[in-house]
């Protein structure tokens, strides 16, 4: 006949367990509960308390001295926030689950870049888009390395972007790509929220970005000297960046198009720009020239000449809609 289970906790001396030779044994909801102690005195004190709790509340609330001390300390810490131990425990469990399900930034970027390359291969993504994104991914990897994605905050991203030695327009581009990267992480349940979405946009100053009006461009072309007028015309009518213009040669200016080589292009990719009739009117007097299209200037003079078109680039810098108004008569 099996020995009946004890209805109370008991003190026993046993083979030492982690240096402790006394134990208190009993059953909590049919499951054996064992607590180890260094001395018989400690064991008997807790055994007595266990049995008092058992008599008063049943086995559900039986706690050791250490467990009661921990619970008391925890409640004291939570008191200012009016949060229960259960709520705190739930919050901690959710936090740990988030930590365990996240990934280091560098590991995620490896996977993300591999996915982007596959999309380029299948034609789902243009190569130029991947090249533009790559610069942001490199900077993210350099800054955050093995930091878990879930541990990167809006403040972290804001401070990092703010201290980059770049113009506001470039910082804004990186911020936009960060939103894209963290959205991809969110879809994969690697983060609960996208911290980049709450980073304030970087607004460019008036001095940094200044788009010329058609009237200003017309005045500039009329006022420019013969040596630089065609440079401003290329910037205005072809939307080519000033640094790219500085790299152009007359051999790259064909009958109907301008060839911007990968070496001279900001995006490091070759492209072809159409020569419109208004632009041709400025280029035709110079046809037959060879070598660089820029006049012989020192670096400072060339930089000063570029200021009116510092942001007169592709897209926003084009004034095709007013070509007829600006073309010489």
Image (tube, rainbow, N blue to C red):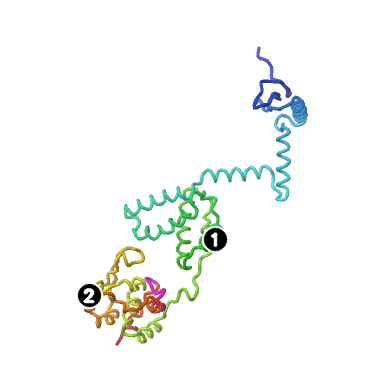
Q: Is residue 33 left or right of residue 98?
A: right
Which quadrant holds the N terminus?
top right
Q: Position of residue 246 (x, y in %)?
A: 33, 73
Residue furthest to the front in view is 298
Q: Residues within 10 Å of mark 2 (few under 14, many from 20)?
A: few
Q: Position of residue 142 (x, y in %)?
A: 46, 54
Toward which corner of the image does residue 12 lie, by quadrant? top right
Secondary structure of the residue carrying tag 2 is loop
Q: Which mark is residue 159?
A: 1
* Magenta residues, start to end: 306-315
Q: Position of residue 22 (x, y in %)?
A: 71, 24
User: Which residue lies at the image location 49% right of the left edge and 71% below the top edge?
Assistant: 204
Q: Position of residue 96 (x, y in %)?
A: 57, 43
Task: Answer above or below: position of 17 versus 173.
Answer: above
Q: Which mark is residue 255?
A: 2
* Magenta stretch encompasses residue 235: no
Nearest to the eye among marks 2 and 1: give it.
Answer: 1
Residue furthest to the top in view is 1
Q: Earlier in the sequence, mark 2 or mark 1?
A: 1
Q: Residues within 10 Å of mark 1 (few under 14, many from 20)?
A: few
Toward which corner of the image does residue 180 lie, by quadrant? bottom left
In whole angstroms, how far apart are the C-alphas of marks 2 and 1?
49 Å
User: Which residue lies at the image location 47% right of the left edge and 68% below the top edge?
Assistant: 167
Q: What kind of secondary structure does the magenta stretch mostly adopt?
A: loop
Q: How many marks?
A: 2
Q: Which mark is residue 125?
A: none
* Magenta stretch encompasses residue 313: yes
Secondary structure of the residue carrying tag 1 is helix
Which quadrant holds the C terminus?
bottom left
């Amino acid at each position: 006949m099996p020995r009946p289970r004890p209805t109370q906790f008991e003190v026993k001396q046993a083979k030492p367990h982690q240096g402790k030779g006394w134990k208190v044994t009993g059953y909590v909801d049919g499951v054996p509960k064992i607590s180890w102690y260094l001395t018989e005195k400690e064991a008997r004190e807790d055994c007595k308390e266990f049995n008092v709790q058992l008599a008063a509340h049943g086995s559900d609330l039986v706690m050791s001295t250490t467990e009661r001390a921990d619970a008391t300390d925890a409640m004291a810490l939570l008191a200012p926030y009016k949060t229960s131990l259960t709520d705190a425990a739930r919050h901690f469990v959710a936090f740990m689950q988030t930590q365990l399900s996240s990934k280091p930034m560098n590991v995620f970027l490896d996977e993300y870049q591999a996915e982007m390359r596959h999309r380029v291969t299948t034609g789902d993504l243009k190569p130029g888009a991947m090249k533009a994104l790559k610069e942001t991914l490199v900077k993210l990897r350099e800054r955050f390395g093995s930091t878990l994605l879930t541990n990167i905050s809006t403040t972290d991203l804001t401070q990092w972007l703010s201290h980059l030695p770049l113009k506001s327009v470039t910082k804004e581009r990186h911020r936009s790509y960060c939103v894209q990267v963290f959205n991809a992480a969110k879809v994969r349940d690697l983060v609960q929220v996208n911290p980049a979405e709450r980073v304030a946009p970087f607004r460019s100053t008036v001095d940094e970005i200044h788009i010329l009006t058609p009237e200003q461009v017309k005045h500039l072309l009329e006022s420019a000297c013969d040596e630089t007028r065609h440079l401003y015309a290329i910037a205005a009518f072809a939307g080519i960046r000033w640094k790219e213009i500085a790299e152009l040669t007359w051999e790259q200016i064909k009958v109907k198009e301008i060839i911007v080589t990968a070496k001279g292009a900001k995006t490091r990719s070759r492209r072809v720009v159409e020569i419109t009739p208004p632009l041709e009117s400025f280029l035709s007097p110079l046809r037959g020239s060879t070598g660089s299209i820029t006049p012989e200037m020192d670096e400072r003079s060339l930089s000063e000449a570029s200021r009116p078109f510092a942001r007169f680039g592709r897209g926003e810098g084009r004034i095709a809609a007013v070509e007829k108004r600006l073309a010489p008569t």
